[in-house]
């Protein structure tokens, strides 16, 4: 049980990249020509970059951009999910449920926060290089 909890906390990020990276390294070793070797090297580089970004993101849980994503993306995701679910439930069960629009002040805040999150992510990537 303890191993399961530890794998949930930290191993998930590593595990999702380990298998594909091992496959890419095996493909590079088994390459019979330059084109296959170059393709395997590109796959390795892409997977390593994605792994590095995921590890950096996981290690910085309380960054401003991460909190901003939670404050912006989570409510919008819930709202769009509710719209989707209601659009399915209404015709199936003959109900007339309605999802209210997000208040204008929240839309105004999103117009500021979403670009700020994007700029923060871009600066964080630039800083890592």
Image: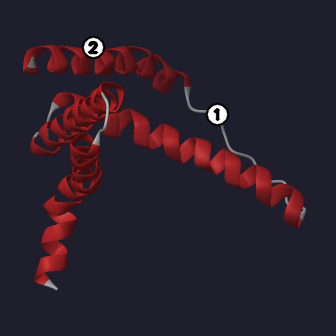
Image quadrant where one finds the N terminus: bottom left
Image position of 33 (left or right of 101): left
- The residue wearing badge 1 is 101
- Secondary structure at badge 2 equals helix
Residue 113 seen in the figure: yes
Q: Say which quarter of the image contains residue 64.
A: top left
Q: Residue at x 69, y 44 (%)?
A: 99
Image position of 97 (left or right of 106): right
Q: Choose between 115 and 32: the one closer to the eye.
A: 32
Q: Say which quarter of the image contains residue 127.
A: top left
Q: Say which quarter of the image contains residue 57.
A: top left
The image position of residue 124, as x and y in percent, is: 16, 20
Q: Residue furthest front?
A: 32
Q: Residue at x 19, y 36 (%)?
A: 48
Image position of 34 (left or right of 1): right
Q: Residue furthest bottom?
A: 1
Judge whether 2 appears above or below 105 on screen: below
Label 2 crowd bin: few (<14), some (14–19), many (20+), radius 10 Å: few
Q: Residue at x 28, y 28 (%)?
A: 42
Q: Choose between 110 and 33: the one closer to the eye.
A: 33
The number of numbered discs placed on residues in the rendered structure image is 2
Colour pattern: secondary structure
Q: Which mark is residue 113?
A: none
Residue 61 seen in the figure: no
Q: Which mark is residue 119?
A: 2
Q: Choose between 121 and 109: the one closer to the eye.
A: 121
Marks 2/1: CA distance? 27 Å
């Amino acid at each position: 049980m303890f191993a399961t909890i530890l794998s949930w906390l930290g191993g998930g990020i590593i595990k999702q990249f380990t298998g594909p990276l091992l496959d890419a390294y095996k493909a590079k070793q088994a390459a019979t020509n330059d084109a296959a070797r170059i393709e395997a090297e590109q796959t390795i580089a892409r997977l390593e970059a994605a792994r590095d970004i995921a590890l950096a993101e996981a290690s910085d849980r309380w960054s401003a951009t991460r909190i901003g994503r939670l404050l912006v993306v989570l409510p919008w995701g819930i709202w769009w999910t509710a719209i989707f679910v209601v659009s399915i439930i209404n015709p199936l069960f003959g109900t007339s449920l309605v999802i209210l629009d997000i208040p204008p002040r929240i839309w105004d805040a999103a117009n500021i926060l979403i670009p700020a999150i994007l700029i923060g992510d871009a600066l964080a990537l630039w800083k890592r290089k």
